[in-house]
Image (tube, rainbow, N blue to C red):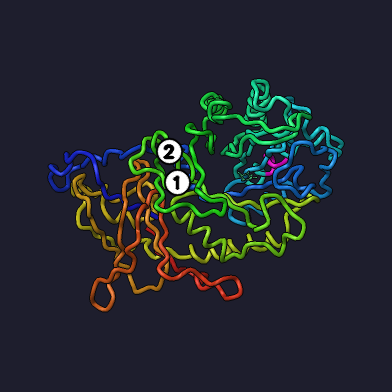
Amino acid sequence: MNKLAPLFVGTALSSLMLPGQAADPPKPYGAVPTPQQVNWQRMEFYGFIHFGLNTFTGREWGYGDENPQIFNPTDFNASEIVETFKKGGMKGMIYTAKHHDGFCAWPTKSTEHNITKTPWKNGKGDVVKEFALACKKHGIKFGTYLSPWDRNHAEYGKEGYLKAYYQQIRELLSNYGPVFEIWFDGANGGDGYYGGAREKRNIGNAEKYYNFEKIVEMIRSIQPNCIIWGAGHYGDARWGGSEKGHVNYPHWSTVGLNGGGGGTGKRGGERWVPAEGDTTINHSGWFWHQGQASRVKSPEELMQVWFDSVGRGANLILNVAADKTGKLDPADVKSLMEFKELRDKLYAKNFALGATATASQTRGNDKKFSPSNMTDGNMDTYWAVEDDNLTPSAVITLPKPATFDVIRLREQIRLGQRVDSFNIDAFIKGKWVCIDNGGKTIGNQVMRRLTAPSPPRTAPAHHGQPGNALHL
Ligand code: FUL
């Protein structure tokens, strides 16, 4: 579990050093992550749960005129849901505290359209609190989704709404313990109920209307460790480019000053804003829908999503919706667990751990930058070469022949992201043969599959063989 960090920029100072002398570490290239972003990128995978009034109407986007009286889950148990997420390998979960319909699933003081107006627990319930406590109990991180677009609020699109919206952010970040990530959806403006006006409202420039600069400042002052998803040009993480979880490749964690979500990012960009792949475990939508069991994604489909998000250096957020009773759909849970089993098999054995590593060059001949750092299982050590060496190579020799079909590489992202192409060769029958010439970005990590993706669900999964990965 190490990193490959050839250097492409900087000064050549260290090349003047004598063998064995201490060399300076490479200078950062482009923007670098904050310590919070490094920790966040190491989470890799967490859950999403869409659960609110839409669960009871069967809609994906509520209009804003739904009666809160319909919210009455009979068997909601946050602890059970969070435990399932944890068993599925999720390191956290994000709950839709408010979706576009404007219904707040906690007793907010900012609007009447909230959980206190529901029959659930006689209006004394708080879904946000139950999820936050359950996450604490099971040792995973809690996060929240708060739609900026509010199709219920009479003042939406005007100044008055902002006061309510800022208060909602403050409440969510002040009353429920640590929030690892807050999600600001990009869907904004359009028709809605708006306190009975039933009209179309256009907010123009969303970044300006909500004043994301101010929002981000406020979030940092309340919870400096919270990762901000979206928020125009002010956030810490960006959309991966599809709601199917597939993140664009190449994937640069850096973006330009005007860059945003959805694209490939920009090499050497001024801001570190890595992508997050988002998708649902079920083809039927983000909220639960009647009869969705037959539309669940297979574990193999989810594996493809894994390689196209986490395997491209992004994080993955996977939605598993709760139904009208407040329970997860058994079909979704089954797939989540089988997906976990496939990943357990994939990661069962790291063939690179402790393998011999040599390289065409080592920075300043300093063992601090030795190629053996790539196979020591320590995420904080790395191999580096001189600044002017743009085409270094390294050789990993396994203690004995092994069969594997995945190779993982990492860069030391604390120093930025710089690699824009790489090849992988194998020594086969006495000669070097290129087995992968499609490698582009590495960043936080890249996982390269050496065989064709597995066939759909009906056929047995072939990448499920135990111990078939080489991790660097
Ligand atoms: C989208 C929303 O419009 C969907 O309803 C969902 O919440 C998804 C995660 O983000 O932009």
Name the residue tied to disc 2. 259
- Residue at 56% over, 66% down: 300
Q: For the residues labelled 2 and 1, say whether their Cβ atoms are less than 8 Å apart.
A: yes
Q: Is residue 130 magenta?
A: yes
Q: How many marks?
A: 2
Determine whether the residue tagged by mark 1 lies in a helix, strand or loop: loop
Q: Nearer the viewer, residue 178 or 62?
A: 62
Label 1: few (<14), some (14–19) or many (≥20) C-alpha neighbours in 10 Å: many
The answer to whether residue 124 is above or below residue 75 is: above
Q: Position of residue 233 (x, y in %)?
A: 47, 33
Query: Which stretch is magenta?
Result: 129-134
Q: Nearer the viewer, residue 286 or 202?
A: 202
Name the residue tied to disc 1. 263
Q: Position of residue 430 (x, y in %)?
A: 23, 77
Is the stretch drawn in magenta largely helix, strand or loop? Answer: helix
- Residue at 72% over, 32% down: 199
- The image quadrant where one finds the C terminus is bottom left
Q: Nearer the viewer, residue 131 or 299?
A: 299
Q: Which residue appears farthest toward the front when viewing the image?
A: 199
